[in-house]
Amino acid sequence: MKIIRPLYILILFTLTGLTAHSSDKIIRIEHSGLKKTGKETVECRLENKEGCEYSEEKWQEERNTLIDLDIFADVQLNVDKCEEGTTLTYCFKELPSYIIYPAMKRTDQDGLMVGPGITFMNIGGLGIHEEILSRYTVVPEVMRAKEVLSYTRIPKLNKIPFTAEFTLSYFESYNALKKYDENSCYSQLDLYYRFNRTFRALATGSAFYVKHDKENPVFTEVSRDMEMFYGSGDWDYLPSAGAGFIIDTRERLMNPHRGIYNEYRATVYGDKLGGDGDFIEYIWDFRAYIPAGEKHIIHTNLLGRYRPGTIPAYELYHVGGVNSLRVYEPDPSMCGQHEALGTLEYRYELFTHKQVSLWDMHGYYGLQFVAGFDNAVQWIKGDRYNKGTYYNSFYAGIHLLVPVLERVRFEFGYSGFENDRYVFNFGANMGWYEKASAQRRRVR
């Protein structure tokens, strides 16, 4: 008994000590570097909670979610363990409160547009983005188009379970693809509700007002003439309302390396909502990101849009340009009521998320080499899918990854096969954002 009792006490103290030193229970969460951002903005996105065991996997998910807010240049985590438990310190480098920049845009419809722009990155410390800009055509024809635009993005907040995006724009231009003088105002509201990390539901509504050009009431660039306008007065009014759902397994939204984005949406336009025209739009938007090594990514996307019904000619889809069919020049005859666009792209990531700081201002940048090919099929009402026009092109270039614009794309290449003939046209393109995103409303 004299030997067993001390041995029992020794074992008990040893086990107690091991338990104390190996505790991963979180006893405190602290934040460093939050000068403009409210704590609740980041805390509602943390999955590691006080009183729970610390998880490295949850931290990686937290970091991606916080970076996707596009208000931080970097987010790091210090993990301090002691006998009482674990203390987590989240260290933030905030992007500037606002950025003034030359607001450039390259569209298939209006060419290169440039003008002043300002983005408020983090209104109220809540991660709310507000972009206000004015742009004017510089290439191919100076001042051919004029645009004033406001874009607002509201992320999920503590008491608001929705993510919201609101766009309001005014355009005055000679529409070189639809061949009419355009004076229009467009507004759109998208609401997203996230059920879990993967599944989201969406609701959308828009209103488009376009003034009639009485000298160009008909579009003649297709196999059969199409009415340009359907309104009885001086303006066409084209409202819409739609709904859909999204399956999204990407590990991050900006520059993803793995996962898929899969969206299905149906939208009603025109007469049923008290407007002009009468059609339904069905959308399938698929994007995949496949890691093929530490620095190698295979990206593919497919956008299918089917629009049965009666549509005004100003709503036709056009391909040709950096946001739809690279290398091809936009042309009025390359159009359709329905379309399918596909891209297969290889990306080599030279580096990503390199930090840059100047005094108290922080940012980041990355660089990728890319190569791939685009495909497009378009057909109009009354034709079958296999009677449509097919195009493809091959390209290569570099993508510069930056805040706000996400990626700046410099690409060159040549066109390949068009229906039953080979074509060899060479060209270069420059664009902004992911092509998979920009092609959704590529003309504007």
Image: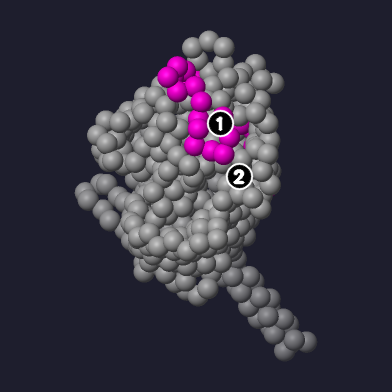
Magenta stretch: includes residue 58 = no
**Quadrant occupied by the N terminus:** bottom right
Q: Nearer the viewer, residue 3 or 269?
A: 269
Residue ID at (36%, 69%): 350
Residue ID at (40%, 38%): 109
Q: Picture coordinates of residue 347 (x, y %)?
A: 44, 66
Distance between mark 2 and mark 1 Cα atoms: 14 Å
Find the magenta span and give its range.
197-226
Q: Picture coordinates of residue 434 (x, y %)?
A: 45, 51
Residue at the disc numbered 2: 379
Above or below — where is 420 with respect to 155?
Answer: below
**Discs 2/1, front:** 1
Outermost residue on the left side: it is 359
Amino acid at dot 2: Trp
Amino acid at dot 1: Asp
Badge 2: few (under 14), some or many (20 or more) residues near its Cα, within 10 Å? many
Residue ID at (36%, 28%): 174
